[in-house]
């Protein structure tokens, strides 16, 4: 009797808790996270509404890093939200409107090939003009600059996924007469989820990559500095403070690791349920954070109180509009006229821009024009060689990782950290090593392009391998297919749409990065090699606007030509021959 009483006394502190109180204790991490998020939003709101200060003094002491990390993380998060909204709208229109698709997809190729800093003057001047007395103006400008470095591969991924949805699944939505909203939320968005998640990780890594020039830059005679990890690292580099650089890199890596554990790993495990298969995977990604969220009473009550009613209201709204659609409300003509007016205005603005650019381009000399063509050929060869080198290692490694969730759980954060560290920070070391072994700037440029673009391929190949249905892999095991047959019959066809998305975004990223890779300031010297990127950078340094415009037009023309002759045909192949059908 005494023994039982002693056991009961030992269990009393836990078993005496009511179930609701114990559930509250388990929800404390979520509650504290919500309070911390609220405090961060209040702090950011207070900072962004302060009087404008574009020349903030950057403190290089380690104690300033948490505050700078908060500001940088807020800019990256805001840029990602804008990127996600843009991605879903742009990809949906391009995938469902053939006439718009012929314009939007080449435009997407063109936009992703334009360097981030090329958007700097117009974006920053516009935002500062909108909010001339508040810090919100330059902050919005920085967010939009980060957006231009994040959004393109996400958009390509969702567009590619929507175009490769199996035909019988599309027919099922027609049979059940789903509205466009129901089709989007119940078929298209879930089918695109895995690729979108992995490309989102790559986009955020790209945001970290471009953080330094997006937080600290020169605009005319003004030196703009926004407090953040990027400006901290740039200030430390300018001062030659190695200790501060190491502290800044350490802080950035810690933030990336925390994001991986608290955000990306739960999202990857959650997106696994959207895999198109009939057999459950033997090994599925797991996340303790996701398990905690699924068993949380706080999250459950918030979902029932806010998300579920909102989702039902939106679904009902579009269902009613679909039911009322056959009735002519007299507004169809007005909408058509409005569309024609908007189109004419766009054409008029385009023609005006073409005339202005034509006048400016006439100032280019014959020698400069010859240099543009030679440079375009050199950069084209570097970009293509970079893609081949990247594909040689990312395809086998990405497939190996994607087929093994336990390996992916380890490789994914390591790859994200490696992709987030700015390659330009490593470039002086790479350049010195190549000079010592006899390599020149031409080889160094290829190395820098590879460091900046190979991750687009790796993340997409991993996503493609993870999306291969388990039942197809089991069929290969049943028929005892060898390695070569397995690659020919399953792996390469299965990852092809994702691989294509990675190649397109890596190609655009390589053209973008050529401006840094081919023209570099090091130890008070300018080191360059023949290339279109070097031509653009040199024209920017010298203020030669006609040459800058001509070289930019050449880069855009080459990207669009490659898109029409190569990528568009491969996209058609992915949508027909390599579409997953049941």
Image (cartoon, helix red, strand yellow):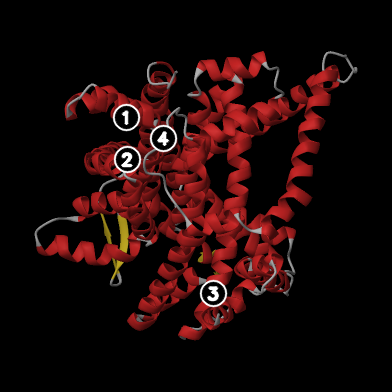
Answer left or right for 532 relative to 222: left
Residue 19 in percent (x, y) is at 68, 65
Which quadrant of the figure has residue 418?
bottom left
Dot 1: what SS?
helix
Mark 3 is surrounded, within 10 Å at the Cα level, by few (under 14), some (14 to 19) or many (20 or more) other residues, namely: many
Kindly report the distance in space between the C-alpha atoms of the residues bearing marks 1 and 3. Answer: 47 Å
Dot 3: what SS?
helix
Asked whether residue 296 appears in the rendered view, the answer is yes
Residue 259, compared with residue 113, is above or below; it is below
Identify the image quadrant of the C terminus. Answer: top left
Residue 499, compared with residue 246, is above or below; it is above
Dot 4: what SS?
helix
Dot 2: what SS?
loop
User: Which residue carries the number 2 mark?
Assistant: 403
Residue 142, compared with residue 189, is above or below; it is below
User: Which residue carries the number 3 mark?
Assistant: 68
The answer to the question of whether label 3 and label 4 lie on touching residues, with beta carbons closer than 8 A, is no
The answer to the question of whether label 2 and label 1 lie on touching residues, with beta carbons closer than 8 A, is yes
């Amino acid at each position: 009797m005494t023994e039982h009483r002693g056991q009961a006394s030992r269990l009393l502190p836990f078993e005496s808790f009511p179930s609701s109180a114990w559930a509250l204790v388990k929800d404390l991490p979520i509650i504290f996270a919500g309070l911390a998020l609220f405090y961060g939003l209040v702090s950011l709101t207070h900072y962004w509404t302060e009087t404008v200060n574009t020349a903030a003094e950057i403190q290089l002491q380690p104690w300033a890093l948490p505050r700078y990390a908060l500001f940088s993380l807020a800019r990256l998060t805001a840029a990602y939200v804008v990127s996600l909204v843009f991605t879903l709208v742009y990809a949906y229109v391009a995938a469902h409107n053939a006439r718009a698709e012929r314009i939007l997809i080449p435009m997407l190729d063109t936009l992703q090939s334009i360097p981030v800093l090329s958007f700097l003057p117009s974006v920053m001047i516009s935002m500062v003009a909108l909010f001339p007395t508040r810090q919100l103006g330059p902050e919005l400008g920085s967010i939009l600059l980060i957006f231009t470095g994040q959004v393109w591969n996400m958009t390509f991924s969702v567009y590619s996924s929507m175009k490769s949805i199996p035909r019988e699944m599309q027919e099922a939505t027609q049979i059940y007469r789903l509205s466009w909203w129901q089709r989007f939320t119940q078929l298209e968005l879930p089918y695109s989820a895995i690729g979108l998640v992995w490309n989102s990780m790559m986009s955020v890594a790209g945001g970290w990559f471009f953080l330094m020039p997006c937080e600290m830059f020169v605009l005319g005679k003004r030196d703009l500095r926004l407090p953040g990890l990027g400006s901290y690292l740039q200030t430390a580099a300018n001062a030659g403070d190695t200790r501060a650089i190491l502290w800044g890199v350490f802080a950035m890596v810690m933030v990336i690791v925390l994001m991986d554990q608290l955000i990306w790993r739960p999202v990857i495990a959650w997106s696994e349920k959207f895999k198109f298969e009939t057999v459950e995977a033997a090994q599925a990604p797991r996340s303790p954070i996701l398990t905690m969220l699924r068993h949380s009473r706080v999250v459950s009550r918030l979902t029932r109180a806010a998300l579920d009613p909102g989702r039902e209201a939106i679904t009902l709204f579009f269902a009613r509009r679909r039911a009322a659609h056959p009735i002519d409300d007299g507004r169809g003509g007005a909408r058509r006229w409005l569309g024609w007016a908007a189109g004419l205005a766009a054409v008029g603005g385009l023609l005006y821009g073409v005339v202005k650019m034509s006048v400016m381009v006439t100032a280019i000399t014959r020698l400069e024009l010859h240099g543009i063509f030679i440079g375009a050929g050199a950069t084209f060869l570097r970009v293509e060689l970079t893609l081949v080198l990247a594909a040689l290692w990312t395809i086998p490694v990405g497939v190996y990782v994607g087929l093994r969730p336990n390996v992916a759980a380890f490789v994914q954060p390591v790859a994200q950290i490696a992709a987030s560290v700015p390659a330009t920070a490593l470039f002086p070391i790479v350049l010195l090593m190549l000079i010592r072994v006899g390599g020149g700037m031409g080889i160094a440029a290829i190395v820098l392009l590879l460091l900046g673009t190979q991750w687009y391929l790796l993340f997409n190949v991993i996503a493609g391998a993870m999306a291969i249905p388990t039942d197809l892999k089991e069929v290969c095991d049943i028929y005892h297919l060898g390695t070569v047959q397995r690659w020919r019959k399953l792996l390469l066809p299965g990852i092809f749409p994702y691989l294509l998305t990675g190649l397109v975004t890596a190609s655009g990223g390589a053209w973008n990065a050529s401006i840094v890779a081919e023209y570099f300031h090091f130890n008070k010297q300018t080191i360059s090699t023949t290339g279109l990127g070097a031509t653009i950078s040199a024209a920017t340094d010298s203020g030669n606007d006609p040459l800058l415009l001509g070289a930019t037009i050449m880069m855009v023309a080459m990207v669009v030509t490659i898109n029409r002759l190569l990528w568009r045909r491969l996209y058609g192949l992915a949508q027909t021959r390599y579409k997953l059908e049941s």
